[in-house]
Image (tube, rainbow, N blue to C red):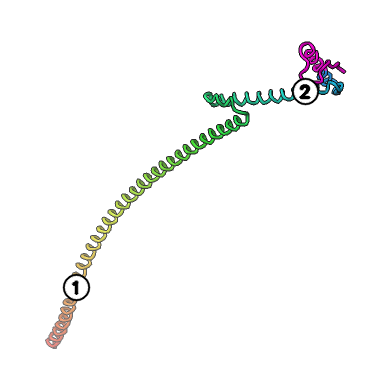
Amino acid sequence: SPACRPGTSEKGAATGPSDARGQIEKRKLREKRRSTGVVNIPAAECLDEYEDDEAGQKERKREDAITQQNTMQNEAVSLLDPGSSYLLQEPSRTVSGRYKSTTTASEEDASSRYSRADRSGFSRYNRDANASGNLVSSSTLEKKIEDLEKEVVRERQENLRLVRLMQDKEEMIGKLKEEIDLLNRDLDDIEDENEQLKQENKTLLKVVGQLTR
């Protein structure tokens, strides 16, 4: 076991060469503890110094860890916002919370801008598409109306042609009827004349017969 310094029962009593020697003994004790895994319990009169040393080491390690954490967080915050130097004076929890809130706000703002841009772009696309669709529909409708009007004109012309043709046929039919009536009259006259000729022929035959006797 390492030798204890005289007069070390009270905290902070040793100074000068005794303090240096005590530090050497402590370092040897730590190295021996790390190499063997066995803790050599110092003498009763050195317990206070040993406990103080262990507590001091733990406190320094904790302070070093906090300092390193604060330094890393402050550097990260400085990279995001170089003008916010006052953040370097705040505790780690406050810096971490502000860093997180700043990052979240930036992400939400960017997301909101992108979302608005997407919505505006989509709305503009919809308006353009609707306008284009309306123009196409209007143009198509006008073309259909124009075609229908032309078709109506053609149908009207065809109807007029058919009406005229029908009128011509009706006139022709009327003329044919008149001719038929005339022919019927002529036929009647011919029949009457034929009947009269028959009667005259009979009379002549009788006269000729009487003359030949």
Quadrant of the image for the C terminus? Answer: bottom left
User: For this view, does 56 lie left or right of residue 90?
Assistant: right
User: For this view, does 200 lie left or right of residue 17?
Assistant: left
Whether 89 is drawn above or below 131: the answer is above
Q: Does dot 2 land on a helix, a strand or a loop?
A: helix
Looking at numbered disc 1 in the image, what kind of residue is underneath it?
A: Asp
- Label number found at residue 139: none
Whether 154 is drawn above or below 128: the answer is below
Q: Does dot 1 land on a helix, a strand or a loop?
A: helix
Range covered by the magenta-colored residues: 1-28
Q: Position of residue 19 (x, y in %)?
A: 78, 14
Q: Quadrant of residue 5?
A: top right
- Label number found at residue 181: 1
Q: Position of residue 169 (x, y in %)?
A: 24, 63
Which residue corresponds to the image point at 81% horizontal and 23% vertical from the top-left? 48
Q: Quadrant of residue 2?
A: top right
User: For this view, does 135 lie left or right of residue 14?
Assistant: left
Looking at numbered disc 2 in the image, what kind of residue is underneath it?
A: Asp
Q: Nearer the viewer, residue 184 or 94?
A: 94
Q: Please name the residue that numbered disc 2 is placed on.
A: 52
Q: Nearer the viewer, residue 154 or 81?
A: 81
Q: Position of residue 150 (x, y in %)?
A: 29, 51
Q: Nearer the viewer, residue 2 or 139?
A: 2
Give the spatial CA distance, label 1 vs label 2: 154 Å
Please tell me which of labels 1 and 2 falls first in the chain: 2
